[in-house]
Amino acid sequence: MTPQELKNSILQLAIQGKLVEQRPEEGTAKELFVRIQEEKLRLIAEKKIKKEKPLPEITEDEKTFDIPESWMWVRWGDLSESIQYGYNAPAQSTGRIKMVRISDIQEGKVLWETVPFCNIQEDEIPNYLLKKNDILFARTGGTVGKSYLVKDVPNESIYAGYLIRTRYSESLCPEYMKYFMESSLYWTQLKNGTIATAQPNCNGKTLSKMVLPLPPLAEQKRIVAKIEELLPYIDRYEQAWSKLEQFNSRFPEDMKKSLLQYAIQGKLVEQRPEEGTAEELFARIQEEKQRLIAEKKIKREKPLPEITEDEKLFDIPESWKWVRVGDIFAHNTGKAMNSTAKKVDKPGSVKRFITTSNLYWNSFDLSSVKEMFFSDDELERCTVTKGDLLMCEGGAYYGRTAIWNYDYDICFQNHVHRLRPYQAVTLLFFYHLFYFYKSMNMMNAKGTAMPGLSSQTLHQMVVPLPPLSEQKRIVEKLEQLLPLCERLK
């Protein structure tokens, strides 16, 4: 149950006469209603309020629940002395009098310090003056139906045209009237009476015809006291509920991060001596790298610096090894975007290519793929082949990684990194590793407004390397567990 649902339940119990007990010595609502009608007749005779047409009798269908015998179903218009629309005038920084607008009422309070002024004829002011215990009612727009009980008026003020003021007998408890205007019965009637236009609106007639259960005055006050006794508990419940909601919303992603952390720290599956060591795997990778250099398929690079103890982000098993990305992947970015026109001075062709906007976490959106001219000598550097790992270089999505698993090749632009393993590794292990690094801000991307992952930063990034067979077992375990995290969402 949400905090609002809990509050709604309490209000429903209140207007059904189930929140406090009935006391015979407090009289009946019928006696109270008679006094209110006598008072209205006196005010009409004194020409302080206008006589209005009688409202229709309340039908049995309008009585949506049972109420105590000492209560009475009444219409709002029979209790009110007036239902008055506000004054239409431009808001000004200075003027004759302050004018409260819908926008000045926030979270049940009038922001008096920001209420603007307006100009109004002196003889019209009494018709629109706000008094303590008036209820203001928003009659149009997104806040239609919301109400505000005027508890004090620190400055002489009127109210604007998109508000309706309802004023009622002093023989009623204003807080009870306001709590009714927060109940589901009120909102149901309001919805049924709201005119469905581009800007939903509700008029004074709808408010006047609303039915409400009327208790004796003393019971109204006891109901209000009980509600206000319970409200702090609702607030405390809301705080606890909000924390639980936040926890629940974070839990699947937090669980995923925990699983990935266990995976890249060697804690998700056991180590098996018969699978060899990462040192042996690393040696084979370096042998393959040297072979590719000897065959002039890749260029010789400067040796990467030794990994310091400070760069080792966490403890790993003895059979694992800390390495740099550039030690195990051939790495480069693609071609800068330019004109798609064919260059006549170089042989080549126009090719489809992917950008950062096509690259998502382990997926690609290829619904819109651009084309650009690539010379023949650019193609090897700027072509993606099945089994390559791609990563976004900059912007909000730097580090976003995906594996190209399509059976055809495609080119890529310079804001995308291509990582091609020198020798077979389990690419999904490194995909999950990069996802974890990015989620934990461990990629050392630079820049403030638009962070970026430079080629040098990625090339020298330190990552843990498990034995190949263990990489595969880690990925198999993650594929069992990660879907459970998704289902929790």
Image (cartoon, helix red, strand yellow):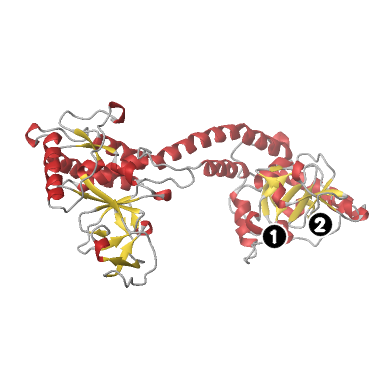
Instruction: Tell me: 67 left or right of 113.
Output: left
Marks 2/1: CA–CA distance: 20 Å
Residue drawn at x 17%, y 54% as measured from the top left? 297
Pair 2/1: label in front: 2
Q: Is residue 73 visible?
A: yes
On the image, the x and y values in percent for residue 362 come to: 29, 52
Toward the viewer: 4 or 221?
A: 4
Location of residue 101 with respect to 243 vertically, above or below: below
If you read the primary sequence from the N terminus, does the residue marked by circle 2 or circle 1 appear first? 2
- The amino acid type found where label 1 is placed reads Thr
Q: Which residue is mark 1?
A: 206
On the image, the x and y values in percent for residue 90 come to: 80, 57
Q: Which residue is mark 2?
A: 87
Residue drawn at x 33%, y 46% as measured from the top left? 455
Q: Residues within 10 Å of mark 1 (few under 14, many from 20)?
A: some
Residue closest to the far top: 309
Q: Residues within 10 Å of mark 2 (few under 14, many from 20)?
A: many
On the image, the x and y values in percent for residue 453 come to: 37, 45
- The amino acid type found where label 2 is placed reads Tyr
Toward the viewer: 124 or 6?
A: 124
Residue drawn at x 69%, y 39% as measured from the top left? 220
Secondary-structure class at tag 1: helix
Q: Is residue 70 visible?
A: no
Instruction: Tell me: 165 left or right of 487.
Output: right
